[in-house]
Every structure is written in structure tokens, then in C-alpha cells.
Amino acid sequence: MPLWDTIRNIFKIEELKDRILYTIGILMVYRLGSYITMPGVDASLLAQSPGNASSLLGLFDLFVGGAFTRAGVFALGIMPYITASIIIQLMGAVVPYFQKLQREGEEGRRKISNITRYGTIGITAVQAIGFSINLMATSPEAIVVNSTLFVATAVIVLTAGTAFVMWLGERITDRGIGNGISLIIMIGIIAALPTQVINEVQTSANLIIFLIELAILAVVIAASVLLTQGMRRVPVQYAKRVVGRKQYGGTTQYLPLKINAAGVMPIIFAQSIMFIPSTIGTFFPDNETVQFLTAWSADFTGLTYSLVFFVICVFFTYFYTAIAINPREMADTMKRQGGFIPGVRPGKATVEFIDNILTKITFPGSLFLSFIAILPAIVAQFGVTPGFALFFGGTSLLIIVGVALDTLQQIESHLMMRHYDGFMKSGKIRGRRRM
């Protein structure tokens, strides 16, 4: 079979084989570390505690593969790094210093990377304090040391743990295959899948219903792939230039504008905002007014929750697309390189043309992305267990699909460079086009 032939070809290429095995080894180290409990915590007593997973903290636990509820040394995982990266990216849109660094090429990227690392350490230290205080409040019987000592220890251990996870991710990016940070997040999400599948099988009325659920999940995954890979290609013509006896330019290339340029970030932002009311409610459990105002956010399957979540996702899709893609910068780059869009004047007209296309293609993309975001709530209404329903959409599904496609494309590139057939007959993963 072609698929098995492709897998065999992967292990015929020594460099690619070493990269894949190195990546697997690093991910195994990460998963092992997530089961190592922090000093000062009794793991057996913690396992018996109900904890608190109905707030923003539950979102963290999804990304770190359950290490949060286990109070592991990797309890905060790579999320502080993601937070720092988002902050730096947002500052790049409004702060001149970061805009300057973004234009400095490799040297600027190196400085931004260092700033992100320092920011990660600071964010982790702050989150570690909050984590230790929350753990003492929700599971006081599991803490076997003095509270002050526990907070100090938690800050040191969790900060070191996140720094180590960040280092593991960078090692995968440099010496492994795929984006290390993304793979670490994905492996944490997938870690919960076997347990949720077993729970779903045990609670399903019969095997036929479970198979129907798997079929629907396959369709949703296929639709998510289309959303991730879909793009509008805008033709760009480059003027001819004659240098000596050689002719340059005169060719037509394409400017790829993705339907979902924002990726999974709108759902992450929206989900974080949606968890804020329930998080506030946990700090005022005896206040009836607060509990009444935050009651709608406690059930992610509720109609009110889904409608608000849908609208916020649409808003953040436009918001993040505006930050991630700069039509003016695209137009200026084309103008410097002697390129132009046929029928459109260079300069302001090109900026308006690109911005108009982005607005049009982002609208259906935002609606589909928002539908994927609330799909877990929809399928939960039909009897699917909440844990398994999360894999029908939302952050978890889009992260898994996006990271898997990116990793497969890198493997595909290695195969094509060695003149081996790829995963597809054409030698390209669907969605990758020659520019």
C-alpha cells in the first residue's frame, strides 16, 4: 500500500528518521515530567480531592495533559510562553520598538525571542503564585508543608518546569521535526483522548451510536482541514527586468490569503473571556448576586453561553486577522519588488484591494470557525459525554489538525528532497501550492 511504502521511506532517510525519533524521545520526557508531583503535595490525597475545573484553570489543564490537576512540576506547561508570545505579537502592532525589531530580519527575531523568554519567566512566576494559592484553597488537605514554604517552592519549581518545557520545545524545533511548542501542546491534548473514548464507549447505549459519533467526528476533522488549508490566491505580476544578458521577472505568482488567517487564536481569546465570569464566581461562592450573574457561564452546553461564545469568536477572528496581516506592508513589499496586481494601481489602491478581499473571505471563515467553536456544546446535547465532546471542535480539534498538517508537510518536504513519493500521489499535501 502507498501509505506503508511512504512510512518505510521515512525510515530509509537517516536524517529524517533521527529527527522523528528525537522528537518522540523529547515528547516522552515531557509526558513523564507531567506525572512528577510538586514537592509539598501528597499525590494520594490530591487525587481524592474534587479540585476546581470549572474555571479558566480547566482550560490550562486541557493544554498541559492533566498536569494541572495532578499538581505536576509541568503544571503550567508551555502556556506562559504562549501568553508571552501573544503579548509580544500584540505589542508589535502598536509599539514602535517592536515594529522596528520585526523589520530587522534575523537579528530582530533573535531579540524578540529573547524578550519572549524573559517574559515567559515573569508570567510563570506570577501564575505559579496563583496556582499555589488556588491549590491551597481547593485541596488544603493535600498540602503537607507550611503555606509560605509551599508558595515559595511552587514558584521555583513551576518556573523551572516551564523553562525546561520551553527548552524542550526549542530542541524539537531545532533538531526534531515540526514546531516543538505546538507539538507539546498537541501531545498534552491528545493524552486525554484515550480516557475520553473509553468513557464514551462505556456510556453509549450501543456500539452503533458510538460508530455514528466517530463518523461525525471524521467529517468534522475533514471540514477543519479545509478551513485550515483554504485560501484565496491573488495573482501578482512582476515586471520584466534585463540585467546584462539575463531577464528577470515577467512571471505571474500568487499572493495566498488564508480564509482563516487567525488560526486558533480567536477561540483561545474567546474561551479565556468566557471563563472569566465563572472564575470570578469561585472567589465569591456565598454571594448570591455574583452567583446569579455568572450562572450562565457555568454550563458550556447552554444556549446563552453558545450564542455569546459564537459572537465573541467572530469578533476576535476579525480582530486577530487585522493584527496578523498588514495589507499596507504587503503592498509596499510588492511595489519594492516590482510586482503589481493586474488591473489594480500600486500603492493605496492595492492596499484597499487586499483589505477588501480579506474582509470578504474572513466573514465565512469567521462563521465556520465560530461554528466549530460551539460544536462541542451542540453534540453534548445529543448525549455525547462532555470530555469526548471537546474533541468535536473548539481549541483542541483545531490545534490537533493544524499541528498535524504542519508536521506532515515538513516530513513531506524531506521526502520530496530525497526524491521519494509523499503522502499524496501528487507529492504534495492538499493545500500546499507552488508559488
Image (spheres, grey):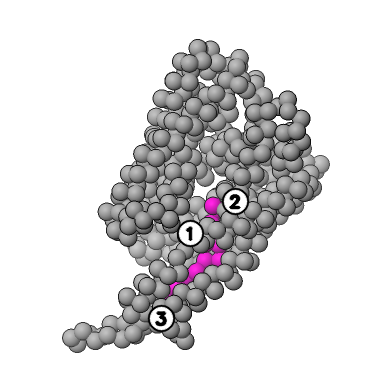
Which picture quadrant has residue 294?
A: top right
Of the pair 361 and 428, the residue shown nearer to us: 361
- Residue 376 - label: none
Cα–Cα span, label 3 and label 1: 22 Å
N-term mark: 3 or 1 = 1
Left or right: residue 300 compared with residue 366: right
Residue 171 drawn in magenta: no
The residue type indicated by label 1 comes to Ile
Give the magenta range: 254-265
Q: Are the two marked residues, 2 and 1, in contact with CB atoms closer than 8 angstroms?
A: no
The residue type indicated by label 3 comes to Pro
Residue at 30% in and 50% down: 110
Which quarter of the figure is the C terminus placed in? Answer: bottom left
Q: Secondary structure at mark 3?
A: loop
Residue tagged by mark 2? 267
Left or right: residue 300 compared with residue 114: right
Residue 256 drawn in magenta: yes
